[in-house]
Image (cartoon, rainbow, N blue to C red):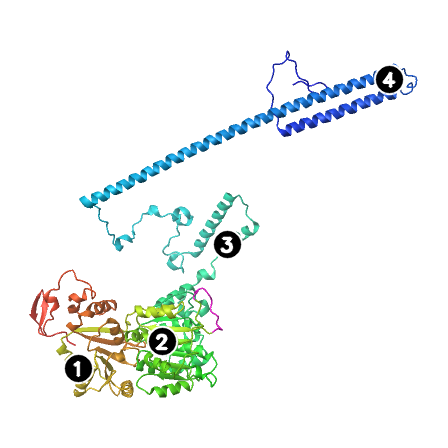
Amino acid sequence: MKRLADGVPVAPSSSSLPPKKPVFLTKAQREQLALQRRQEETEDQKRRQSHVLSNLSHSRPSSDAAPPTATANSDRDRDRDRDRDRDRDRDRDHRDRDRDRYSRDRDRERDSERRNRDRDRDREREEEAKVRERARLDKLAERERDKELDAIKEQYLGSKKPKKRVIKPSEKFRFSFDWENTEDTSRDMNALYQNPHEAQLLFGRGFRAGMDRREQKKLAVKYERELREEIRKKEGVEEKPEEAMAQKLKEEAAELYDTFDMRVDRHWTDKKLEEMTERDWRIFREDFNISYKGSRIPRPMRSWAESRLSEELLKAVERAGYKKPSPIQMAAIPLGLQQRDVIGIAETGSGKTAAFVLPMLTYISRLPPISEENEAEGPYAVVMAPTRELAQQIEDETVKFAHFLGIKVVSIVGGQSIEEQGFRIRQGCEVVIATPGRLIDCLERRYAVLNQCNYVVLDEADRMIDMGFEPQVVGVLDAMPSSNFKPENEDEELDEKKIYRTTYMFSATMPPAVERLARKYLRNPVVVTIGTAGKTTDLITQNVIMSKESEKFERLKRLLDELGDKTAIVFVNTKKNADYVAKSLDKNGYRVTTLHGGKSQEQREISLDGFRAKKYNVLVATDVAGRGIDIPDVAYVINYDMPGNIEQYTHRIGRTGRAGKTGVATTFLTMHDTEVFYDLKQMLIQSNSHVPPELAKHEASKFKPGSVPDRPPRLAETSLPTAGTEECGGHLRPRGSWQQI
């Protein structure tokens, strides 16, 4: 498009240029063009005005004499200019109007095309969705027809489904230990693995395994520097001055041997408490076979001086002659001082009594003493035991430890006047030690209440359940206040100043009934296991002798003849048999006494006192003496009758080998005891004791009771050889005698 000298566009003539298509201008371009035209028009108008003024100034001296013709010419020129400007404005308005109309038409066409495209696309989508839905319905109908056809075939022809292969757990969780060197990806990730610092013989004198600690530190610092440089290159970050200084200090430290490098680590017994590391505590727990299960477990105590017990209790411990704590005491006392609920599983004779008595006395010493104001509310703590003898033994231990604290202890057991016991409780006491049956009787008759009792100990809990005391134990636990249970959230910290309900549960085994009690009444308990649950101590030598019923008494006399000044406990299963064996031994000149449930409490105490004082060196007892009773220096335990379960066997032989001393347990086994053959054999194997060949070969010792053997037992394995024969190659041949004692 051509423009005049004054910038006004003019349409080119049809003869000079071919016609061009109109150019679409945006709104911003149209506004810019309109602004330019307006500026040009303003400049043109100013130019004309200045031209007119200059003409007037030149003609002013002679304006009065100017002829009327000049004036007329100037008016004519002015009118001409005005007409020309009007025509130009009109043309420009027409052009703008035409351009706007064209742009509107074009926008309208584009909108209509877009709508048509969207409409077509939606129509295509709907058609595709209809096709997919039709295909899905056809597939469902075909599947239903196939199911119907399969059902008809199965009804008339029978099913031929392949049996599902049962995968054994051993195959399902089998782990493959085979691997190749190519699977070791650590060498690709860490440069230290590519050039390992290997041990060199006769090099690095004074270092373990010939490893030079300084060379190790140099390699580690070098690898760290290279790794940091690589990270900085990737991120495009420069090294800061403080980082460079820290790296330089590490390199200088790597050149020196420090005290840590030159040290020779000591055993935990040579270290102070604050010097103990996590590795030392792990070795400590392994040395004493201590294992925990729970959260936020405190460190065990290594000695009485580190126990955080009060001076009075430490003085009482020293007075009682306890030089060194036992493993269960090391583990359980720190837990009790934190008011944690504890389940203690420890082998018999391991010092469980002091493990719960000392924390209990610490708890009571924080409370106000029993006076006339609060004596009617009952004791502060209750200890329950399955037998009278064990309860009285716990009472003796508690009185011994409470010697310097002025704490009053009362025992409530059967065989004594319940009125007298109730009177002693009403007079006020801090600790009640009782059997469950007598304690629940006192509660039901209102001789005692437990309104302020927040500390309860269940000693030999499994034995109490076995004896049928579970309802009485539950009744006692329900009679205690339940408003101060610990929070169920195990992560919540306990307030040491607040009094929480604390429950201690000790047992040598953990049957399901005891676990049920623990889940109901204990809050986030810590399970402390010393050794293996239900396992006997390694200090006991176990002997098993296969015998006939008629031969047992003669074998018993042979064993007792070897006693000398030592003491022995002979266990039988019934009160009648206890009296018979004791009377027979007494006729043969042995110093013997009996202990069973048929005797009065006074007679039982006389028998125990006489046995402890070595007035008698043989005690014939039923299972009354099999639990928790601590009789010092029992050298032999003889199971004249094998008990009906292995747990009772464990507790019986636990009467010897106590307090770190050794002991011998001998068991007479007959063919009437086949129900315990399997468990007894497994226990002998676990304790590395000798298993008699008759027991090892017997069919009942190869299968757990209740399981079905793969084959019927042979005659030679079920019949016991006579005293003058022995089995050899499937035949019986004479021999000198049975196993000699």
Looking at the image, is 173 positioned above or below residue 545?
A: above
**Horizontal side, residue 207 vs residue 545: left or right:** right
The quarter of the displayed image where residue 307 is located: bottom left
Q: How far apart are marks 3 and 1 (CA)?
A: 78 Å
Q: Where is residue 527 in the image (x, y as percent from the top left)?
A: 36, 68
What amino acid type should be assigned to the residue bearing mark 2?
A: Gly
Q: Mark 2 points at which residue?
A: 475
| In this rendering, the label closer to the viewer, 2 or 3 | 2
Q: From mark 2 to mark 3, how far is it between C-alphas?
A: 67 Å
Magenta-drawn stretch contains 234: no
Question: What is the CA distance from the residue labelled 1 to the residue labelled 4?
Answer: 169 Å
Q: Residue at x 23, y 44 (%)?
A: 151
**For residue 46, above or below residue 286:** above
Asked if the residue at tag 4 contacts the one at tag 2, i.e. Cβ–Cβ closer than 8 Å, the answer is no
- Residue corresponding to mark 1: 557
The residue range painted magenta reads 488-498
Nearer to us of marks 2 and 4 is 4
Q: Give the percent coordinates (x, y) of residue 243.
A: 54, 51
Q: Which of marks 3 and 1 is in front?
A: 1
Q: Decide which of 225, 304 is in the foreground and name it.
A: 304
Mark 2 / mark 3, whichever is N-terminal: 3
Q: Nearer the viewer, mark 1 or mark 4?
A: 4
Instruction: Give the mark, 4 or 3, whose residue is nearer the N terminus.
Output: 4
Residue lying farthest right? Answer: 65
Res. 94 image quadrant: top right
Q: Which residue lies furthest to the top in this view?
A: 15
Q: Residue at x 69, y 22 (%)?
A: 92
Do the numbered discs 4 and 3 sit on residues whose CB atoms are within 8 Å?
no
Q: Mark 4 points at which residue?
A: 71
Please tell me whether mark 4 sits on a helix, a strand or a loop: helix
For disc 1, the neighbor class at 10 Å (few under 14, some 14 to 19, many from 20) is few
